[in-house]
Image: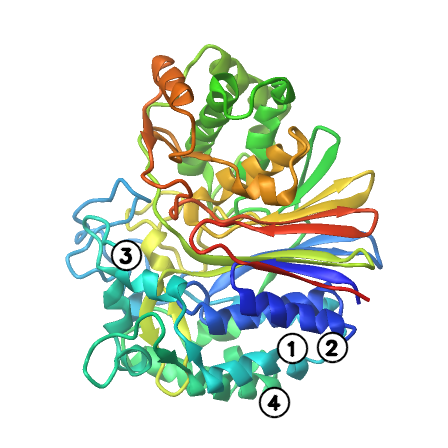
Amino acid sequence: MKGVVAAPQPMATEIGARMLERGGNAFDAAVAAAVAQIVFDPFMCGLGGWGSATVYDERCGRTESIGFWPTIGERMYPEVWVNDVRGFTDIWHFALFDDFRNMLGYQAIMTPGTVAGLGELHRRYCTRSWAELLQPGIEWSERGYPVPEYMAAVLRESAIRGLPHPGLRAQRTPGIRALWQKADGELRGRGDHYSNPDQARTLERLVRHGPEDFYRGELADVIARDFEENDAFVTRTDLERYQVRREPPIQGTYRDCDVHSPPLPGGGLLLQQMLNVLECFELCSLEHNGPDHAYIIAATLSWAGVTRFRHLADPRFWDVPVERLLSREHAADIAARIRRRELPDHRALNAPGHTTHLCAADEQGNCVSITHTLTTCSGVVVPGTGTYWNDCVALMDPIPGRPNSYVPGKARASAISPTIIFRDGRPCMVVGAPGGWSITSAVVQAIVNIVDFGMSPTEAVSAPRFHSEGQPVFCELRIPQATVEALQSRGMQVEQQAFNYAPSFARVQCIAIDQGGFDAASDPRRDGGAVTFSRS
């Protein structure tokens, strides 16, 4: 079947494309590619992770959000660590503890959703067998491959002040040391052979017993036993009770397009709000990344940061005024503030995100956008399973009574924004990105670049970019100095990154669809990626 897959990992896109070549649809390609991403990018995503998919099924003409969000374990409670917090980082607002307990080890883990989410996507939309879709992941986990630079770089990253060095994640538990520590005690680096035979055995179990085994079968027993022995907050009951959230996406408009993105606790609220504000301006009449265009973009991102900090939360546990935040009146108010050159005064910085994304579309009209992640790896690999585990507690709040405080069952709020855009009732764009809190800002700018400025996907994802969640405003080194100086003269705090393609900015994956033809691109930031077409 003719179709396309876009993802940051070249091997994952090839595996997805092969499913299209075998007659599979976009959903088959997406599941196979997502499992391959777990194999080829284990610090960014894993079976112990979580995410969200926005899905369009041409057969019924319906879009659906499949949210496989992480949830707080039942042994955790709001006051559990309140007396041990010693502050918060400016970057990402991580809570700080002397022992990094919310970032490393078993107590950093929240109930995972990735296996359930991919299982639900397969059950509802795929045409190929579960076994066929997992087989490439099984083979490559067993066979192994040379460590690519994008994996090795994760362990070499500089530590954010107050946070553990990323390399400690590969040394935290015996299970992960067995995968990453060489005989001489050094960690594997670029070009060293990496394999994960235990992960192959786990995937084989999931083939034989289905995704339910991860939550309610013998595999769940193995996981729960290890968690209990190591004082994790997630229990066997949490695994048994876990459910994906199938919901209508948030639907909005931008210019002549209909925009479908994930509901809370995902980043669709932020994305839609930003597009509502930007629609108040005639961007196409402005010079791209010139002073006026740049100020409108950067200020819109800054004001969305206010919504993120005040309101982004799990709506099952926190009252979020979604209707007001997405109203045209609210957008007009923010646009008026921007015209008056008013900016929010809170400070919120950016840091790299440990996440991945993929987009897929086929000639029948089906398409899917999936973001999945570990948040960052907790350093836990349950012995004998090869499964990497999330550290989602890192971005929850240890202070009770706040939007993202520790409450059993509550999902973690996130900026992830897997999005599908329609024109005249037909899909015209599939887009999304990895990159932590910079995801929504990147996806919005890619959409604007295509819709307002007529860029191709490659041009749109590669163009110089801004990010902000308040103050300061970050921009890449390619932004003209005249623009930077103009923004500063208008009262913006601007910090220009030392990179032409900033690795800390989100890495957009995008497919444009036009009368059955595809044009797709993978963001060149941080090693770029690959797009593979399959033609009938």
Kindly identify which residue carries mark 4: 208
What crowding class fits label 1: few (fewer than 14 Cα within 10 Å), some (14-19), or many (20 or more)?
many
Kindly identify which residue carries mark 1: 133
Q: In this view, does 99 lie to the left or right of 495?
A: left
Q: Identify the element where label 1 is drawn.
A: helix
Pick the front one: 358 or 320:
358
Comparing marks 1 and 4, which lies closer to the viewer?
1
Task: Give how far across and how far down residue 489 sits, in percent.
Answer: 35, 13
Q: What residue type is labelled 2?
A: Arg
Distance of label 4 from label 3 (alpha carbons): 39 Å
Residue at the spot x=38%, y=23% of the render? Answer: 481
Pointers 1 and 2 in contact (C-beta within 8 Å)? yes
Q: In this view, does 460 lie above or below 220?
A: above
Query: First in sequence: mark 1 or mark 3?
Result: 1
Pointers 1 and 3 in contact (C-beta within 8 Å)? no
Q: Is residue 193 left or right of residue 433?
A: left
Task: Work out which quarter of the rendered image holds the C terminus and state it.
Answer: bottom right
Kindly identify which residue carries mark 2: 128
Q: Is residue 455 left or right of residue 302?
A: right
Q: Which amino acid does label 1 sit on?
A: Leu
Kindly identify which residue carries mark 3: 157
Q: Which amino acid does label 4 sit on?
A: Arg
